Image (tube, grey):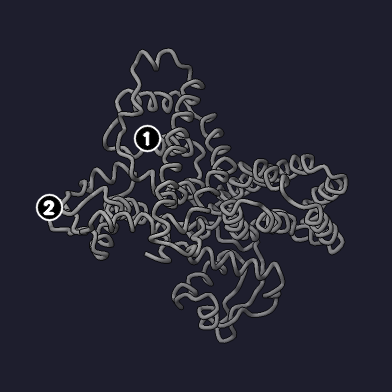
Amino acid sequence: MKGSNELYRLVYDYYATRILFGFYTYGDAMPSTHKICVQFRLAVPTVRTAFTYLERDGYIQVEASKVAHVVYKAAPARIRKNIADYFLPREDGLNDIKVAGQILIEPLFALGLQRWEEDQWNQLREWLTNPSPDTLFMPIEFYILSLSALDNKLLLNLYWEMVRYLCFPYLTEDQMAWKLSLEELGIHTNEELIHYLKAEYFKVYNKTVDDLFSFLKTVRPKYAPAKPEPVPFQWSLYRQRPQIRYSLAASIIRGIVSGAYPIGSYLPSLPQLAAQYGTALSTIRRTVSLLNDLGVAASQHGKGILVCMTPQTIDFSSPDVHEMLDLYLESLQMLVYTSRSVSLFTFQSVSGAALDVLTEQFRSIRKESRTDLYLEVYLAFIVKHCSSAMVRECYDKLKLLLACGYPVTLMRLKKDSLGQEYNPAVLQAVTSLEAGDTEGFTDQWCEFLSQQESETRSFIMEQGKHLPQN
């Protein structure tokens, strides 16, 4: 499973966790493929892939035309050890996620609710009056329904990764605990209903965490007398398409922007790139093809891969370019949605010396006419100084994904206009930080991101209108 970024991991982790932690025991029947497809909103082939890996790893046995059964055997002592082995290295991460969830997920959740229409509210009320055994843990369904209203696959991916790391929401079965009568629902406004559900959820969450930490305190002397190596939260990206080529393309684009691969020079050879990035030669070939479609590079027979950064040649009809730009827009949108809470939280604990360094960096990129590095510089500041490890991890990923959009930004603004676009924002940033006005800086930063997201989205949509119609 390590290193894979496929959607089947959602199903694999869910059932592997329930088996390892004793929720399912030897001989138990697994749910049907159809039921799992409904639960996870995934296609049959994806669920079958998960079952293949569960069988490979010794958790279940799959027989043709029959229900799969659990074949993993474990005594109670082994179950306790499984739980301890998983959670002891993640204690710090669990505490951090409680904080990061308020900074990252809650603003997204609230924004999603604002976009609900009557159909979503009716669906929620139906769930609460008739909880279905085919649903996952009710709060997971609740949050997914809200986040889905934002139409951003990247943030749904982040939420699922957080749930996968926590693990214990996978172990709850009692959907009836969330049941409300029609009479109870009738006296609640939508806002009161949300307040009630969130209060109940956090009550359950906090009790679960307290019970888990009490258990870990009891078993620590036996299973981890020395503090285990911490396992922090990691955000793995997975979508319908394999993600490696997009991450590699973003890394190479960042190298071009930073000067590591100067325009007019040649990239390392395909075998050298494969060795440098630790991936297959076939993946590198697909990555180079994507860079060609983006106008970032040009493959020259017998010479190599020329770095050219001529985005006026972007092939907007390419499915890979379409996916790359989707990643860019979704990452930029996530920054728009979370930038205020993340910035204000980071500034609460950052030192004056660190703020001085940030201010000087902004002055420097103005002096060097590189104000196009505004986002890069500030996101690097967040990644270095935010006190939440999960926020640092998420913003580090977003910083990489923003490189996916550099070619289209260059096409939209033209090289000579980049400074005109970014220079006023950087000047405002310097002025605010020199005055010690971090809230004013945050307001300006959020406004700048929102403007960039709106204008870029409109520009990309306009390019799509000019494509030949099949």
Q: Is residue 15 left or right of residue 254?
A: left
Q: Name the residue beneath numbered marker 1.
A: 138
Q: Residues within 10 Å of mark 1 (few under 14, many from 20)?
A: many
Which quadrant would the N terminus be assigned to in this image? bottom left
Number of numbered discs overlaid on the protein picture: 2
Q: Nearer the viewer, residue 234 or 24?
A: 24
The percent position of residue 394, horizontal first and vertical second, equals 57, 53
Please state which amino acid type lies under the numbered disc 2.
Answer: Lys
| In the image, residue 146 above or below residue 432 | above
Q: Is residue 451 left or right of residue 466?
A: right
- Give the quarter of the image for residue 178: top left
Q: Nearer the viewer, residue 272 or 342?
A: 342
The percent position of residue 113, horizontal first and vertical second, equals 51, 30
Q: Residues within 10 Å of mark 2 (few under 14, many from 20)?
A: few
Say which label, 1 or 2, has the lower sequence index: 2
Q: Name the residue beneath numbered marker 2.
A: 66
| In the image, residue 300 above or below residue 357 | below
Q: Nearer the viewer, residue 288 or 435?
A: 435
Q: Is residue 62 left or right of residue 98?
A: left
